[in-house]
Amino acid sequence: MDCPSTASQVNLKTKVKRTVRRFSSQAGKTQYLQREVERQSLSWSNWIGVSFTWLLEPPMVPNQEFPPRRSYILGDDAQPGPHFPEPLRSWPRAGTCAAHPKGDPCNFALERLLPDARCEQAAEWSILQQLWQNRGRRSRLLAAFRVQNRGLITSFVAAEQAMRKRLALGTDFVDGSPREASLGVQLLWHGTRSQSSLLDICRDGFDRAHASSCMYGKGCYFATSGTYSDKFACHVRLPGTDGGRNVRAMLLAAVLVGECVVGTSNMYPPPRKPHSVSGERYENTCDRLPNPSIYVTFKDHQAIPAYIMLYEP
């Protein structure tokens, strides 16, 4: 087996020394590089076969061991309630903590869903597939990652309950009629430019401070159309696939949507409701009324990442 030797090389101009590899022949170099590719591929095969691993980035140092399976319990206060849409209502109360190939800490549970009618998540996949087809997508959905961040979900559930109680208080409105019916949890699309941003959102949630496009207010933007969010989605390279394969990723988020008003450029905060006795502000701004296609949130915990969708353009 031809293994490289090491030698020192000095730049005559800069006097900088570096270590280089030397091979006895070009054929030996070719064989060595091929073995390295096979070794890394074997290393990745362990990670690819496990459903709770983060596969959107190659590792700095290939790990040939299966990642440890660590239990992640959501608890009752992090369970989506009866007002939430499917498949959120049927989410399991426990999962497996995400494992990252670079060893980065992950504070959420992760489960990869695949288009296989025989798997236990077949019903969940069917709902996601239907959402994908209904929201303006004309490309093939390859896989989805279910994301369950205990802290984010707990805060989201509490925010939904608080918002519902506030809107149900009829005495707060000029006409005495409650507005509870205006509140809903919608599954909306969100594109982000990089794989690292996807991981940041899964860890820490949506941050309006990162908003770059503020046509309808300075907040976090979500769309009813996957086609629109695709403009902001990122390219990803899946391990074990041809590097030329064009795969993209975007988020499917659970978003609290209440009373809306059409937003304006850089608006913050949203305006006060003219029909609110106590001067409460609108829960969201949007691009148009009725039937908005873009919603903007302004408060922390008003949206959570629910799924990462992998698809072909």
Image: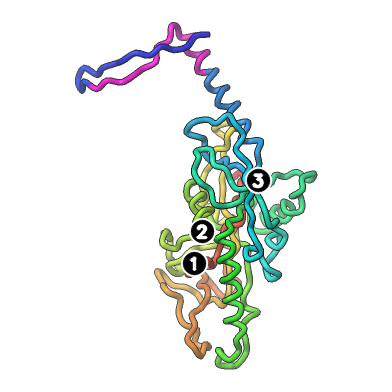
Q: Secondary structure at mark 2?
A: loop
Tell me which amino acid carries mark 1: Asp
How was this image coloured? rainbow
Report the residue marked by disc 1.
Answer: 300
CA separation in Å, label 3 and label 2: 19 Å
Tell me which amino acid carries mark 3: Arg
Position of residue 100 relative to residue 210, above or below, is: above
For the point 50% across and 14% down, the residue is 30
Report the residue marked by disc 2.
Answer: 205
For the point 77% across and 48% down, the residue is 120
x, y percentage for residue 106? 53, 48
Q: Secondary structure at mark 3?
A: strand
Asked if the magenta segment contains residue 80, the reply would be no
* Farthest-out residue, right: 118
With 141 as the anchor, is 305 left or right in this view? Answer: left
**Where does the magenta region start and end?**
16-33
Task: Give whichever of discs 3 and 1 has the lower sequence position.
Answer: 3
Position of residue 56 relative to residue 262, above or below, is: above
Front residue of 19 and 219: 19
Name which quarter of the figure residue 7 lies in: top left
